[in-house]
Image (cartoon, grey):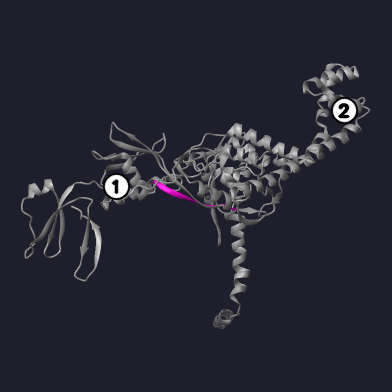
Amino acid sequence: MARKKQESETKKKGNFEGIMGLVGSTTEQAISETLEYNYMPYAMSVIVSRAIPEIDGFKPSHRKLLYTMYKMGLLTGGRTKSANIVGQTMRLNPHGDAAIYETMVRLAKGNETLLHPFVDSKGNFGKVYSRDMAYAASRYTEAKLDPICAELFRDIDSDTVDMVDNYDATMKEPSLLPTTFPNVLVSANQGIAVGMASNICSFNLKEVCDTAIALMNNPDHDILETLPGPDFSTGGELLFDEAATREIYSTGRGSFKLRAKWHYVKEGNLIEITQIPYTTATEVIMDKVAELIKAGKIKEISDMRDETDLGGLKLTIDLKRGVDPEKLMQKLFRLTPLQDSFPCNFNILIAGMPKVLGVGEILEEWTAWRTDCVKRRLYFQIGKKEDRLHLLKGLERILLDIDKAIAIIRETEMENEVVPNLMIGFGIDEIQAEFVAEIKLRNINIADLRSTLDSPRKLKNVIIKELEEVSKKYGKSRLTEIVYQTEDAEPEDEEDNVPDYPVTVFLSREGYLKKITAQSLRMSGEQKFKEGDSLRFAREATNRGEILVFSDRRRSWATTCPKD
């Protein structure tokens, strides 16, 4: 036993010395090499495979989730538990169920993040305008694809996009979704990568489609005529600035000014705020107003509360007597997030490379990409029809005279006239004609497909027709109202909200300054000073008057009358 114990201790000692030898050994490596081999692959992975959207308007996490739901039959079927969708998505996106479900929440109708949500949700999915309203767990909520997703997956089975292996090469997934409209500008998107970021605001679907069509017909089209500004799911008002808007449309960088929408209820002497900027939350606004009231910077409000319910967002402000609601709101716009800015950074992956593009450049890239999708669809259809024609020609003797049948079908303009013409041409009855027609001879006109494929004008018309259909079927009125301001309009000075009235200013010999209204002066009588101090002088003034003060150190500064 003693011998075995000694051998064991010797073995442990040898292993320990070996490990310490490895720990003690060092290898010199230049910092540039460390960054190149260790950090750069990570940075590129975040940029290309996680944070920056591509020309279809989706990040990989969005695309994997939506494609999984499509393969689950949730485009036409009923809702299923969100937990089921999350579990299925992990076959394509191995980043954990919490991250997948958070992606679904953002795409859901109930969360109100997108102008056109892609997930038809049931249950509590939180709200984009609330910081504290948590969404329910995935086991409680249900979801399916919204009907607009039919435009994301149209002809996806016709080789319109590349299908690539998933992370373990057990199934295929699309590298992009063949969207029939410029979703990259319709759906708001934000992402932070390594060394770069992306922040794309949402635009109205109908206006984007109209702009894309106008640019295809006229490359010199003024985008501002058909796309006056962004449109956000939370509504609000957009303070239009033509110079800033044109800068963003040209460079892809800049910011839009947004503010809340409100109305005054005279009966209760209160203000109701029903829409807020997309960039803030109700709790942030409430906290800021409470902070200003506590600091004494806002005295016009007696109470503020959040009355948001199933009917939608509503913040209510109770006013003190005699307060001008318009002036108060202008003050709140200056001091709180009720007026905020949306910073734009239109950074998009184009063929795997991040590029900051203007609106016109984005639509140009999308049109070129969509044209390629349509070409691939036409090639696929031609191949299918050629295969079908090959089989039909092999049945020539059985199907009477195939060439004659093809000629009749090609020369028939109306589909419902195909069967009668076959009956006349071959002297057969209706049952026989239906049998011949049902072999899809009516769909083998390959010449038209090739003609479209070879004509840029016809290809453009196909895309325009699809855009018009999407615009007509899914287009909505703007939620964000555009407010046009005159160039010489100046922001209201905060001083304008300070009431002006007569006051008496007292200065003591020890340098204490005080202002008193006429009413308070009548009630208080003689002014009191601390022991050893007395009045130096008193002057009549106004509440908004300015005083020029000189110190014994030969310094001076201007100030308004002190607070009561």
- With 214 as the anchor, is 448 left or right in this view? right
Q: Is residue 508 visible?
A: yes
Image mark for residue 406 = 2
Residue type at mark 1?
Answer: Asp
Label 1 neighbourhood size at 10 Å, few (<14), some (14-19), many (20+)?
few
In the image, residue 202 sits, relative to residue 445, either above or below, namely below
Q: Is residue 340 magenta?
A: yes
Judging from the image, what secondary structure is the residue with disc 2 in?
Answer: helix
- Closer to the camera, 303 or 455? 455
Q: What is the x, y in percent for residue 99?
A: 53, 51
Judging from the image, what secondary structure is the residue with disc 1 in?
Answer: helix
Image mark for residue 280 = none
What type of secondary structure mainly makes up the magenta span? strand
In the image, residue 558 sits, relative to residue 275, either above or below, namely below
Label 2 neighbourhood size at 10 Å, few (<14), some (14-19), many (20+)?
some
Q: Is residue 135 magenta?
A: no
Residue type at mark 2?
Answer: Ile
User: Mark 2 or mark 1, which is nearer the start of the sequence?
Assistant: 2
C-alpha distance separating marks 1 and 2? 83 Å
Q: What is the x, y in percent for residue 528?
A: 7, 57
What stretch of residues is rendered in magenta?
338-347
- With 367 as the anchor, is 295 left or right in this view? left
Q: What is the x, y in percent for residue 438?
A: 81, 26
- Closer to the camera, 301 or 442? 301
- Quickly name the residue at label 1: 496
Q: Are marks 1 and 2 in contact (CB under 8 Å)?
A: no
- With 418 as the anchor, is 181 left or right in this view? left
